[in-house]
Image: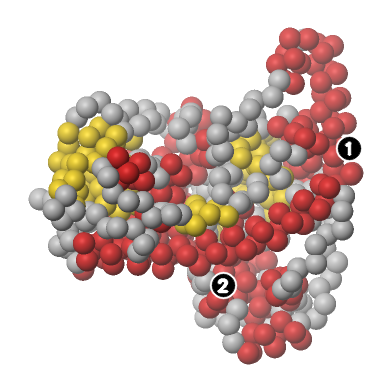
């Protein structure tokens, strides 16, 4: 029986184990962190600290692509999530009021998202995978190096951080944004193909809440979320499992005027000033169940080691974030990882011989999965960063050389057909080039009625003032009660590295 070693036991690694186990392989997952807590699901989630996966404590969503993968590939896991209180969100509820005929159309059944905290979905996945025959999940152990047969070249074994040699026919690099296979290959003398990178320009702040009742306090104007990406910041709310929801605020990295967003008072002031969010944060509507966590996102990255430009090593496959990282504002990471690992399993089933040809075909498939979304995120982030930078510097907003994206977004607010195509793209079902192609689509965008006014976010000066005032008031109250506590609250928590909490 062939052996697969998966380096990393988060979403991509665990889903990879689920997918590969169906091929009759012996699967070993090596995860550097300790095992998650046992016990009732909601209690275990509350006790699960993730120092090696800081993004796990931030807002996540499962897009329509991810829901489709679970429906087709892991319906039991989707059922477990639903039983745990995760909601299937019908995105057509957010069709524009001016859409005219609101009769359901073919394809609308795909327009759903899953309201579920990442920790809930990951813990359910962990428990399902460790119960599979032929799968072993080992914690507190990580892959340190590869042993290669240099004649092919192909994988022969992995060496762990504890010095153990484990024979392996296949190795999946599911080490996330660290993409450690780059280091393993370099250490083995294999040339490394260059990455494609583009800045994400994002510092995010997240806080979790629990609703006082199962009735949603306000509309989900984005179908799977409330809020928006505005002209100088973003504020988005995602429903979760167990009557929870998360609020994520995002700014440019290194914006000193909005550093108080890391405090509970500053965060709350900004969230309550953000359109569509205030009803959810009313004291009678919800209660905070976490503090504020901050993180600086890494750049959008399409890994050269995952693609066709990499000198191939048979049996080695980067998956998920180890293959491609896109800005979390788009919420695509988990869904793309699920899609990728199951497509990889299909390829391995069709081409079971572990050869360089198999590895080359996997690289082509990987770039087919990720390239459209990397390029979309890179272009969208470039436009957004320029707008946000102009707001921070108090200069005139840039005039885009191509305003196609802005015109399509405006048309989606009044035309149901355009809205569906935009939503399919945002939910990772259809790549942008396919979603927006054709003369008929362009005509609809040109002829779409002008959108009605939407709630207006606070301008930058107002937002900065509200955040600063709230933080100062809270600090004053703390100083009157506990000087030491106030000093600790004021002390900044600096990021150790990009992608780490700040």
Horizontal relation, residue 455 to residue 377: left or right: right
Please give the count of numbered marks on the rendered protein: 2
Q: Position of residue 361 (x, y in %)?
A: 28, 67
Residue 113, above or below 451: above
Q: Position of residue 301 (x, y in %)?
A: 50, 53
Q: Position of residue 299 (x, y in %)?
A: 56, 49
For the question of whether residue 204 can be seen, the reply is yes
The numbered dot on residue 212 is: none
Spatial CA span between label 1 and label 2: 38 Å
Please tell me which residue lies in front, 10 or 104: 10
Residue wearing tag 2 = 432
Horizontal relation, residue 456 to residue 100: left or right: right
Please tell me which residue lies in front, 58 or 232: 232
Residue wearing tag 1 = 465
Q: Quadrant of residue 161?
A: top left
Residue 114, above or below 282: below
């Amino acid at each position: 029986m062939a052996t697969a070693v998966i380096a990393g036991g988060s979403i991509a690694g665990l889903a990879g184990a689920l997918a590969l186990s169906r091929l009759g392989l012996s699967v070993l997952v090596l995860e550097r962190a300790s095992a998650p807590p046992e016990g009732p699901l909601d209690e275990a989630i509350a006790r699960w600290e993730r120092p090696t996966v800081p993004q796990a404590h931030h807002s996540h969503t499962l897009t329509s692509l991810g829901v489709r993968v679970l429906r087709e590939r892991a319906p039991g896991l989707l059922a477990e999530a639903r039983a745990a209180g995760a909601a299937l969100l019908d995105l057509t509820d957010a069709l524009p009021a001016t859409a005219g005929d609101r009769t359901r159309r073919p394809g609308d059944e795909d327009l759903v998202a899953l309201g579920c905290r990442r920790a809930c979905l990951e813990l359910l996945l962990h428990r399902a995978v460790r119960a599979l025959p032929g799968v072993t999940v080992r914690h507190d152990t990580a892959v340190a190096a590869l042993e290669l047969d240099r004649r092919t070249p192909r994988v022969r074994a992995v060496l762990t951080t504890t010095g153990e040699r484990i024979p392996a026919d296949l190795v999946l690099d599911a080490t996330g944004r660290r993409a450690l296979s780059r280091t393993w290959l370099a250490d083995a003398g294999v040339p490394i193909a260059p990455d494609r990178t583009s800045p994400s320009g994002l510092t995010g702040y997240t806080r979790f809440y629990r609703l006082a009742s199962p009735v949603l306090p306000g509309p989900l104007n984005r179908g799977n979320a409330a809020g928006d990406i505005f002209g100088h910041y973003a504020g988005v709310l995602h429903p979760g499992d167990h009557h929870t929801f998360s609020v994520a605020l995002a700014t440019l990295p290194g914006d000193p005027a909005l550093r108080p967003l890391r405090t509970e008072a500053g965060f709350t002031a900004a969230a309550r000033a953000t359109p569509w969010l205030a009803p959810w944060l009313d004291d009678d509507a919800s209660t905070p169940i976490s503090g504020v966590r901050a993180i600086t996102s890494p750049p959008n990255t399409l890994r050269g080691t995952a693609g066709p430009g990499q000198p191939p090593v048979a049996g080695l496959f980067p998956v998920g974030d180890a293959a491609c990282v896109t800005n979390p504002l788009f919420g695509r990471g988990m869904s793309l990882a699920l899609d990728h690992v199951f497509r990889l399993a299909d390829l391995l089933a069709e081409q079971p011989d572990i050869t360089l040809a198999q590895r080359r075909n996997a690289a082509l498939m990987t770039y087919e999965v990720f390239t459209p979304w990397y390029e979309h995120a890179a272009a969208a982030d470039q436009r957004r960063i320029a707008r946000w930078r102009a707001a921070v510097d108090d200069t005139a907003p840039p005039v885009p050389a191509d305003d196609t994206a802005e015109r399509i977004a405006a048309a989606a607010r009044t035309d149901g057909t355009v809205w569906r195509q935009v939503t399919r793209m945002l939910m990772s079902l259809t790549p942008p080039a396919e979603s927006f192609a054709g003369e008929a689509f362009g005509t609809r965008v040109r002829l779409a009625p002008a959108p009605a006014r939407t709630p207006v976010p606070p301008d930058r000066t107002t937002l900065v003032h509200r955040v600063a005032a709230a933080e100062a008031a809270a600090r004053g109250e703390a100083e009157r009660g506990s000087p030491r506590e106030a000093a600790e609250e004021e002390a900044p928590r600096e990021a150790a590295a990009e992608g780490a909490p700040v």
